[in-house]
Image: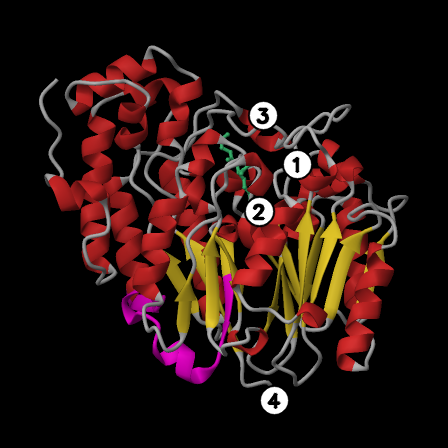
Amino acid sequence: MNTTAEIQCDALVGPTHNYAGVAWGNLASMKHGQQTANPQLAALQGLAKMELVAGLGITQLVLPPHERPDLGLLRRLGFCGSDAQVIRRAMRHAPPLAAAWSAAAMWAANAASVSPSADCADGRIHFTPANLIGQLHRSIEAATTARILRTIFSAPQFFVHHDPLPPVPALGDEGAANQLRLVPPGGRRGLELFIYGIDTAAHADSGGRPGHRFPARQTAAASAAVARNHGLHSRAVGFIRQNPVAIDAGVFHNDVISLSQDNVLICHEHAFAAGAVEDIRQRYRTLFRAEPVVHIVPARRFSLADAVDTYLFNSQLLTLPDGRRLWLAPEECQRHRRAMAVLQSLQDQGTFSRLEFINVRQSMHNGGGPACLRLRVPVTPAELAAVHRGVMLTPALARRLRQWIKRHYRDRLSPRDLADPRLITESRAALDELTKILHLPKLYDFQRRHGIATLPG
Ligand code: SUG
């Protein structure tokens, strides 16, 4: 039996969850922009998913949300005065500055790239927080993410934390959403695959992709830098190009179009550039002298549009403590005939033995499915024992968090409501209490500076 367990780390949805439509190239975000969100329901849906996973006997961690609005961002952009004045002045420039209210740190798959100790030259787990520079509202996450990860995974004999890559377009990095990993049965060491959208070194014009509809967020240079920092062996790494056609169809991250677990790779026919799947098979063969299990879903049975509509590939494929696998799909698949046919065929082929559906619709409307909401960290028992205990989800913690959400979160938040200066006081009160619930030290700038009260307008 494999002695490595995989921790699932989900971020709690923050109190300012909203639909500002700020993620260009993410069709769900573009479609639902300006609608009214329900932050309370969003947080409860995310928590219900965590409870389901923990109930399966899998270690589930809770990551705290980030402080929003990000007044530091607004002040850097030239808005001054009291907190209330900064908010009022910034919102006159809305909608672009809704970025400062974004709860997008909820999509933990973009928090960082993670390499388990078995893959790294120094035998420690390596983390690189993603710089997320492709979009303003996400670029403000890296510093807080780094602080949170360093706090939760603090033991230096087990965990190494790199700084986010320099924030330039040529090094755009979106974290584990663009990582796949294959491990043979009973093995610990894996083949890490980094999926990039653009190789800027091959495009003298850097970030842009002339002739394309949507931007590619992950660069080849960023993937290569992460692999180097993590000390991965060159034979145990592959760099795979995303299919530009998929990006233009709304596949802004690889985890919307392929997934991996154990020795199984499941991908859409149009997920990668030509020849990529054969390249992956070859690398796996050379490294492990075995064949990976690869399922390619053909476009004639399930189109790219189907993938983006249902987020089928954004399911969590979970290995249960007894070694069997459970497929946790977004509820959107359940009502989709072609998605159900793909699932049936995967189950018939033994990819998983149990199928569950989860309602994370508040997140889905912003383009984030079940797998977007979690970051995986494979750990040995000794590494697990070194993780901060206060963030491990137990039934008692889940109960406390549910009460906390119900007490602090609004059940309606429209883009116009973001201008309400009371929102910042409410959010700070919620986060201040949360750090105590999770037994974390003071994490947020407001806790370090001047407490939770805002200054009078
Ligand atoms: O970066 N949506 C996120 C969704 C991220 C999904 N994550 C993974 N695929 N792993 C994004 O596009 C929408 C925010 C808004 O429009 O208000 C947003 O940022």
Contact (Cβ within 8 Å) of mark 2 with mark 3: no
Element class at badge 2: loop
Q: Which residue is mark 4?
A: 1
Name the N-terminal-most of marks 2 and 3.
3
Task: Report whether residue 348 is seen.
Answer: no
Binning the other alpha carbons within 10 Å of mark 3 as few (below 14), some (14 to 19) or many (20 upward) gives some
Name the N-terminal-most of marks 2 and 4.
4
What residue type is disc 1 on?
Answer: Ala
Q: Which residue is mark 1?
A: 216
CA separation in Å, label 2 and label 3: 16 Å
Task: Report whether residue 287 is seen.
Answer: yes
What residue type is disc 4 on?
Answer: Met
CA separation in Å, label 3 and label 1: 16 Å
Residue in view at x 40 percent, y 84 percent: 382
Element class at badge 3: helix
Which residue range is magenta in the image? Answer: 376-396
| x and y percentages locating residue 390 in the rendered image | 27, 67
CA separation in Å, label 2 and label 1: 19 Å
Mark nearest the camera among 1 and 4 is 1
Q: Is mark 4 within 8 Å of ligand 1?
A: no
CA separation in Å, label 4 and label 3: 45 Å
